[in-house]
Amino acid sequence: MAEEELIKNISNGGFKSFKILVNENQKKVLNTCFRFTNNREDAEDLTQEVFMEVYKSITGFRGDSKLSTWIYRIAVTKSLDFLRKKKRKKRFGIMKSISSEETLREELKATDISSPGTQAENRDRIKILNEALEKLPENQRVAFTLSKYDELSYQEIAEILETTIPAVESLIHRAKNNLKKRLYNYYEKKLI
């Protein structure tokens, strides 16, 4: 079904068309949300919120970009809003933060690892990388995540972030340099 027809059907309350849209994009949205939250349950909740927003706002879709790009933009925005709220709650002591061990267990469930030594090593690497990613400025983290984990093109990232391709290239370049410094400093201290 053509994108225009799909949008028209959904706008007119077509649940079958909406189901097609969800089936085509659900895995990508879930993965994107997970990359930001590092928690499967939170990512699933955000994915539901994304598609509720898509359904509610589809009539406002202008067609300036592909529908999938618009959906990614909603997923990134919802994920970042979630993280901001979580930080605010943590800052004010309303809610205790989710332990990183629980997050790491979730990530390790998704991988097929056989030896306990390999599990521990991968758990440490994931934890270190996630900590380094979390310390990046938000725009760098978003651009890097969409590029490296979601494998989106610079053009797609530029559309999602509503910026230019050179700006995306610069963000990713700075993110790589910042990650390189953080990881180098971590491992250098560990070896001493």
Image (tube, rainbow, N blue to C red):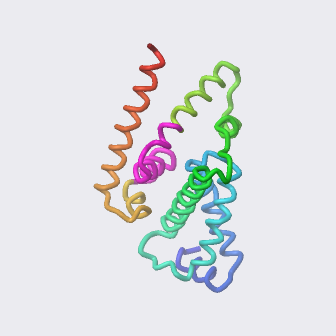
**Residue 28 place in picture, x, y as percent:** 58, 55
> For residue 15, which quarter of the picture?
bottom right
Q: Is residue 106 left or right of residue 67?
A: right
**Residue 68 place in picture, x, y as percent:** 52, 65
Query: Image point 50% across, 43% down: which residue?
Result: 134
Q: Say if 153 sits above or below 124 in the image.
A: below
Q: Is residue 134 magenta?
A: yes
Query: Image point 45% across, 48% down: which residue?
Result: 141
Quadrant in which the C terminus appears: top left
Q: Say if 9 sits above or below 134 in the image.
A: below
| Outermost residue to the left | 166
Q: Nearer the viewer, residue 22 or 39?
A: 39
> For residue 106, which quarter of the picture?
top right
| Outermost residue to the bottom | 12
> For residue 188, which quarter of the picture?
top left
In the image, the segment drawn in magenta is 131-153
Query: Image point 54% across, 56% down: which residue?
Result: 84
| Outermost residue to the front | 92
Q: Nearer the viewer, residue 15 or 55?
A: 55
Q: Is residue 152 magenta?
A: yes
**Residue 124 place in picture, x, y as percent:** 58, 27
Q: Say if 137 sits above or below 163 in the image.
A: above
Quadrant in which the N terminus appears: bottom right
Query: Image point 64% across, 60% down: which residue?
Result: 46
